[in-house]
């Protein structure tokens, strides 16, 4: 087990280098002058333009900029935004909000996916199964901004259950509605995976053996069926967590969530190489460690899995 964990940690290094290089190159190759974008409609004087360009090393070749960025990472310095604020401070203010939102959405997704998927698998071909598949297909087809606007109208405006936008400081009660929107938009795939896995597990020999030993249905379903059916669901959830960390930009924009997605979108528009790459670097690390945790969780869910 320890050897496997060490090997996975060593895999982080080339993945991290490759990811940061590609992202830095794509931002560097974007057309336009990011310094001019900083001033909007105003035109800075040549002296100011040259000063800012030199300050952020934008006058140097791509490979030099990238090397300077990497050396800064090893010193614990992620650089400055164009507004002069350290990127670490921006991360410290936005990262916890997105983490909180993502975890809330994942909990909602898992509750819906496992409960509905389990019941559908146990009642294959019946009314509940057919309805859940139809609703799941609809949720997979509807764009997330449509779900967000419907949630805002009914849960926020019509019934006044939640705030329609996130207030200053992003209090947890304001994140419930965007978390519900994200959870509903993601649960369908996990639900279908759970359903298919439950149906397959019910036909396994160890389930029939459990019933032949006289074990009750209340014992067989949660211990033998559900536990062994969760691996594909957990795998999909880990992928969704990574998507939520960097891909909830639309939802964060609609609900005015001061998170990573919103900040990353603004940094891309301004061409802030350092901010974009730093955010992506942290997201890659989070994604890799979440997947490592999920891989280790497989052995808990299925005793047949062992890591050498």
Image (cartoon, rainbow, N blue to C red):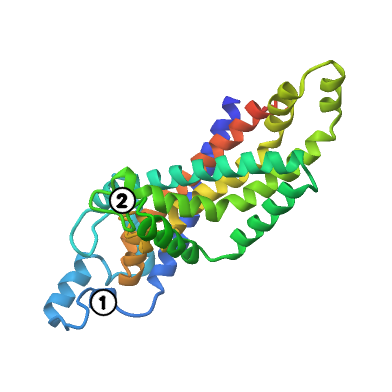
Find numbered disc 2 in the image and state the secondary structure of the residue it sits on: helix
Residue in view at x 24 percent, y 65 percent: 56
Residue in view at x 70 percent, y 40 percent: 119
Say whether disc 2 or disc 1 marks the residue closer to the N-terminus: 1
Q: Which mark is residue 24?
A: none
Residue neighbourhood size for the residue with mark 1, other residues' Cα within 10 Å, grouped as few (<14), some (14–19), many (≥20) = some
Residue 93 picture location, percent across and down: 27, 48
Residue in view at x 54 percent, y 35 percent: 293
Residue 242 picture location, percent across and down: 50, 50
Mark whose residue sits in front, 2 or 1: 2
Residue 224 lies in quadrant: top right
Identify the residue under disc 1: 37
Find numbered disc 1 in the image and state the secondary structure of the residue it sits on: helix
Residue 51 picture location, percent across and down: 15, 71
Residue 17 picture location, percent across and down: 46, 52
- Report whether residue 154 is seen: yes
Q: Is residue 308 above or below residue 167?
A: above
Residue in view at x 41 percent, y 55 percent: 155
| 43 with respect to 154 (left or right) | left
Quarter of the picture containing the C terminus is: top right
Residue sitting nearer the eye, 286 or 168:
168
Identify the residue under disc 2: 94
Q: Is residue 24 above or below residue 43?
A: above
Quarter of the picture containing the N terminus is: top right
Q: Is residue 217 above or below residue 166?
A: above
Q: Tell me how far mark 2 sits from mark 1, CA to CA.
A: 23 Å
Residue 57 lies in quadrant: bottom left
């Amino acid at each position: 087990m320890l050897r496997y964990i060490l090997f996975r940690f060593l895999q982080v290094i080339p993945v991290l280098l490759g990811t940061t290089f590609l992202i830095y190159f794509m931002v560097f190759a974007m057309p336009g002058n990011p310094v001019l974008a900083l001033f909007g409609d105003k035109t800075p004087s040549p002296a100011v333009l040259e000063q800012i360009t030199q300050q952020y090393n934008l006058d140097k070749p791509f490979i030099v900029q990238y090397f300077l960025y990497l050396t800064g990472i090893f010193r614990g310095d992620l650089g400055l935004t164009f507004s002069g604020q350290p990127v670490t401070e921006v991360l410290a203010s936005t990262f916890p909000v997105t983490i909180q939102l993502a975890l809330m959405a994942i909990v909602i997704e898992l509750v819906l996916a496992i409960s509905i998927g389990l019941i559908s698998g146990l009642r294959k071909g019946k009314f509940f199964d057919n309805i859940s598949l139809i609703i799941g297909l609809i949720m997979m087809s509807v764009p997330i901004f449509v779900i967000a606007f419907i949630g805002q109208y009914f849960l926020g405006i019509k019934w006044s259950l939640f705030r329609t936008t996130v207030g200053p400081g992003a209090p947890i009660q304001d994140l419930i509605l965007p978390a519900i929107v994200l959870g509903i938009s993601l649960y369908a795939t996990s639900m279908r995976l759970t359903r298919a896995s439950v149906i397959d597990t019910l036909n396994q020999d160890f389930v029939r053996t459990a019933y032949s030993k006289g074990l009750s249905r209340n014992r067989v379903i949660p211990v033998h069926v559900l536990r062994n059916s969760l691996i594909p669901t957990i795998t999909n959830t880990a992928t969704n967590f990574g998507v939520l960390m960097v891909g909830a930009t639309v939802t964060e924009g609609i609900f005015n969530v001061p998170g990573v997605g919103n900040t990353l979108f603004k940094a891309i528009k301004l061409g802030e190489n350092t901010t974009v790459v730093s955010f992506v670097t942290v997201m890659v690390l989070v994604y890799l460690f979440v997947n490592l945790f999920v891989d280790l969780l497989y052995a808990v869910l299925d005793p047949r899995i062992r890591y050498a």
